[in-house]
Amino acid sequence: MVPRSADLVCHISQELPIPLAANFTCKAGEVLAVVGPSGGGKTTLLRMIAGLTTPKDGHIQCGDTLWFDAQSSLSLTPQQRHIGYMPQHFGLFPHLSALDNVIAGLDHVPKALRKQRALDWLERVNLHGLPDRLPAQLSGGQRQRVALARALAREPSILLLDEPFSAVDRETRERLYIELARLKQQLSIPVVMVTHDIHEALLLADKMMLISQGKMLQRGKPFEVLSHPHDEAVARQMGLRNIFDGQVVEQDIERNMTWFKLGDELIVSDSAPALVNEQAIRWVIPNQGIRFNAISSGRLCKSINKLDVLIESVLVMGESSRVIASVIGIGSMFNADVPTHLVDKLGLQAGVQTTIALKSDQIHILNSPPSS
Amino acid sequence: MDWQALWLSVKLSCFTVLFLIPLAILVGRGLAYYQFRGKSWLEALILVPLVLPPTVIGYYLLVGLGNQSFIGGFAEQFFGQQLVFNFSGLVIASIIVNIPFAVQPIQRAYETVPIDIRDAAACCGMSRLRIFLKVELPMVWPGVLTALVLCFSHVLGEFGVVLMLGGNIAGETKTISIAIYDSVQAFDFDSAGMMSLVLLLFAVSALALTTSMSRRLGGHNGATQR
């Protein structure tokens, strides 16, 4: 068995049967979210760490124990790796009760202690009074908890979660976020969580890794990745919609500022990557970097990066509204989610002209070539 | 009523399922879980006995297991026993003829075991044998039971292949189907009617059981997953 609190080091690559390349370290006590679209290789990566699939090349190590090494043809079985794994649909044994499902993961514990240990784990995941129920008699959230209890009851070296919240309803999901966030503080093992939901990664992960079509696009702290995406592909994966072309006018490296043009409008950004004047760039601004002027009061008079816009449409989607506005004289479309109460307060509606201000510290220049 | 023929048929059915079901579990599991080159051909080969006339299968088995064949010659040399016109030959023939009846339901049952459950079992630290006994078998047993019942009843009623390979030797190869044929030939309709009724009742019961099992398999594994 691997000593507890060991870091997970993973360097894998392969071209076939599906291309996949990933290099990362997940430290003990850290939650790493692997984020990407469906079919991007996330689950395959998780199965490789678990030993359920063998990569073609690379190595996987947990603490001092080598789990997989292509060069020496070493590959420990999932049983030998001693991991906690929660598959997407939980993988509960349908013919066993909740209690027996947890006991199934306790083969490392003396037989006499297993039942009590399993009951303790069910208590820890807030599943009281249901040990005798079959999985079919449990709700989605309860099943998820049984699967989590079973995975953790193994006292694993690492915990692997495959889309842990995808099979439960929204209300249960919100509750489970809080429970997992609480549980995270008690765990001293690496946790790798696969998800396609950026929101989950921002909420629960200490680090995130974006993966698409088998390639690792970017990794880092979730809010860093959100505010500083490497390139347009990452920005789009992160759900950022306001990506535009620009042309550098001037840079002040000492003050860390870049002035560039969007059409004829001058924009300033609080970042200064190595660029030259006149260089064509792509830049991005997240939702929270866009402020709308109140139609009546004109609050933005002292702001910089002001643009006159025409509101094309306002689509109310519950508590939030999607406002689409085009920059007058340029045509670039800004796409912002604004709280619905704010839309009413500011008097935003289709066909109205107003002003938006772009926060200079939220403008990020991408490492992507401008669109042709 | 030819009790000796009935007993021989039951004995033949028991031996067939005894050898065939473990083999079918192995093959059905492999076909359900793994993708490999030539899988479609293997699946087609398994189904061949379903579409070939029993006399054609009987002919090939007669040629393939006869004294002049490698297998027949080997059996005679080492066990002092020929395979044709003999009970052991009938067992081999019944196994071959019933492969699709055994493999198909078991393969279908294994296909309903979600990969999540297999992965979870391995990650729970269970050995392969324990996964088979504690996880897979409890989930696929309706398929295994269906295969068992289908094979047992099919062997009980097998006529063409048995007649081609075993002939009509009382106590050795004369099964209940052949006894019914003999009775009709001898205008003993009472005996033929009685034996036919036994086979009919058995067939209806077997089909009712397998239908119930199939329904149970469908609900059993699917209802708990989503």
Image (tube, coloured by chain):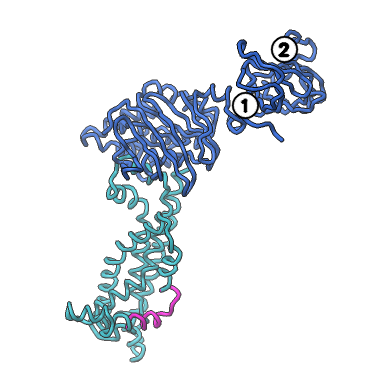
Query: What is the three-letter code of the residue carrying label 2?
Result: Ile
Q: Residues within 10 Å of mark 2 (few under 14, many from 20)?
A: some
Q: Report how far apart the C-alphas of labels 1 and 2 lie in the structure.
A: 21 Å
Residue A37 higher or lower than A311, as above or below:
below
Q: Is residue A54 left or right of residue A276?
A: left
Question: Residue B10 is drawn in which quadrant?
Answer: bottom left
- Res. A366 mark: 1
Which residue is pictured at 39% across the width and 45% down the height? A53
Which region is colored magenta?
Answer: B49-62
Q: Which percent across, then down, holds residue A121?
A: 33, 29
Q: What predominant SS class does the magenta segment belong to?
A: helix
Q: Is residue A330 left or right of residue A139?
A: right
Query: What is the three-letter code of the residue carrying label 1?
Result: Leu
What residue is shown with label 2? A304
The outermost residue toward the top is: A302
Q: Chain of mark 2?
A: A
Chain B drawing hue: cyan
Q: Which percent across, then down, holds residue A266?
A: 74, 18
Q: Is residue A242 visible?
A: no
Q: Nearer the viewer, residue A5 or A109?
A: A5
Q: Chain of mark 1?
A: A
Chain A drawing hue: blue
